[in-house]
Image: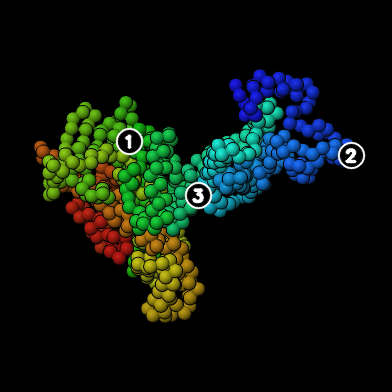
Amino acid sequence: MINERGGDEREDNELEENELKTGEHEDDEPGAGEPEEAKLEAGEPGDDEFEASEPGDEDPEGRETDPQEFVRPPRRITGQPTTGGPVSLWLYRLLRSWPGRVGLILMATSTVTFVFFGLIELVAQEVHPYFGLFHFLVLPPLGMFGAVLVFIGFLLERRKRRLAEERGEDWLRLDVTRTRVQQRLLLVSGLFSGALVFLVAIGGYRAHEFTDSVTFCGELCHVVMEPEFVAYQNSAHARVTCAECHVGSGAQWYVRSKISGLYQVYAVLMDIYPRPIPTPISSLRPAPDTCEQCHWPRHFFGARLKTFTHYPSDGGEEPWVINMLLNIGGGDPEKGYTHGIHWHMNISNGVQYIARDERRQDIPWIRIVDELGNVTVYQDASNPLTEEEIAGGDVRTMDCLDCHNRPSHVFKSPVELVNQELLLGNLDTGMPEIKLLAVELLAAEYETKEEADLAITDGLREAYASSHPEYYTDHQRQVDEAAALVKRIYSENMFPEMKVRWSAYPDDIGHRNDPGCFRCHAGNHQSSDGRVISTDCNSCHTILSQGIRGQEGLTTPAGASFIHPLDGEVIDYPILCHECHDGALGLTF
């Protein structure tokens, strides 16, 4: 076989064996290991002498050279190195193309910066969310892009070499058949590959962790996710990560969440995201795969006492108290009867429905499958679905989120917020009309938080200065403190930039300000044989006592009818709470 130097391959192998024995290479000049001064003293010709040799010149012995016998030494291409090992030659050839130069710079810069950022993360107690974004989502892809450019640069340089050889031009060649060259190239390639693998492996793992973190979900897109993040921090699930509920375990839903997240990133960058973010989320993982990993309805049982405290809006100091027993229910069908609120949780019975609207507030069709397999279909008698609508409808199996639809992102109504602060003593019940004024200021609509802060402070001062001047004169500091508290309440529950407030999202746990339970238990769902879904309030809760605090009268275990605190009259079906209450300027008691 003819090699690149024009000789036979066997001759090359013999030459290489001789080189290994003698330590010299055929390309090495005689006395290559001697000092340069020794070469000059020995009279060895230098570069200048070769360049001065022309046809007709005399050689050192005085003979005139024959033009026919003259052979010009191999010429050097301008800018090419004449010395250096295989690594330097390899790097030189790579650096001749701009993709190679840029790629090497990107690889080196991203690797060094990645390591440096890692050291900062180890010693720093807290870093900015964008630090993690750049560290784990920008630097590793940047290093990979640099590696691609290096490969492109190598291909371009090889193509240039082939074209030059076809034109008969000289080109710097690297003899990769030599063992020493192979070892050095292998070492350099290994270092580059190792750095890239390190960057991709560590960066990929940390990127996976970072994209599942609360910081990534809640703080990176500050304006968009601020309402959800603030509400989440004040919720009972504040120590549960976003991914545990929104993604869960397993690769399938992880990949699905990242794919759906690509459009969310695009929407944020192009500023086309909806305000507020619509719910329910159609792509959310079913609750049995997430919620029920911690909350297991089969192990629920019994009842829970809950106390509701309502302060009057006219300035009375004593609240109306309702002590209610919530029939949580549940239970394992293999061990006993399932009952109560968690009867709906598909333990023994299956509950399916079709909603007419995307928010699942209008439910005209319900199908129940009991423990014996009997199927009963209930339709809204006043507005049933047609056969075509049923055939094309989305039949949903009821789960946790059909009632607990705001488990971690609760935006409370102004009435509920002010009642809570009065109960905790943060607002002084002795301040005239404080509940009414605070609710009015919280319920008003503002364009920005800054506008809300100014309006709340000025509004409360002006209200007391005009309506209660004597109180304002003596208690100006208390009024300013109340204004500061109302502003804090507003900042944690109202977000005008995203158009988020309590009325933007229905709360289906209960039925005070939204239909909630009455979506199915309003008495208008009937089966074909005339049966009606129960409207008995005691099926889910029992009122034990109610009245002015300290004067609540006890009742029988069967429970009492609800007495409205505003006028002291009994309120019962078919009057529904949400038909009067709106959480703000409706009935604010």
16 displayed left or right of 408: right
Residue drawn at the location 28% of the way across and 60% of the way down: 582
Disc nearest the viewer among 1 and 2: 2
Q: Is residue 533 visible?
A: no
Spot occupied by residue 451 in the image (x, y as percentages of width and height) = 42, 70
Q: Nearer the viewer, residue 551 or 400?
A: 400
- The label shown at residue 561 is none
Residue at image mark 3: 215
Image quadrant for the C terminus?
bottom left
Of callouts 2 and 3, the N-terminal one: 2
Q: Position of residue 469 (x, y in %)?
A: 42, 80
- Looking at the picture, how far across and down is residue 408, in whole percent? 41, 48
Question: Callout 1 environment at 10 Å: few (<14), some (14 to 19), or many (20+)?
Answer: many
Q: Nearer the viewer, residue 71 or 428?
A: 71
Kind of element beneath mark 3: helix
Disc 2 marks which residue? 41
**What residue did someone put label 1 on?**
330
Using the numbered discs, state the Cα–Cα distance from disc 1 to disc 2 in whole angstroms: 104 Å
Q: Nearer the viewer, residue 313 or 177?
A: 177
Residue ID at (77%, 38%) = 65
Q: For mark 3, does the 10 Å Cα neighbourhood hold few (<14), some (14 to 19), or many (20 or more) residues?
A: some
Task: Give the CA separation, mark 3 to mark 1.
Answer: 36 Å
Q: Are marks 1 and 2 in contact (CB under 8 Å)?
A: no
Amino acid at dot 3: Thr
- Indicate whether 57 appears above or below 550: above
Seen in the picture, residue 33 relative to 225 is either above or below; the reply is: above
As helix, strand or loop, the secondary structure at mark 1 comes to loop
The answer to whether residue 363 is visible is yes
- Element at label 2: helix
Q: Quarter-wise, where is residue 28 in the image?
A: top right
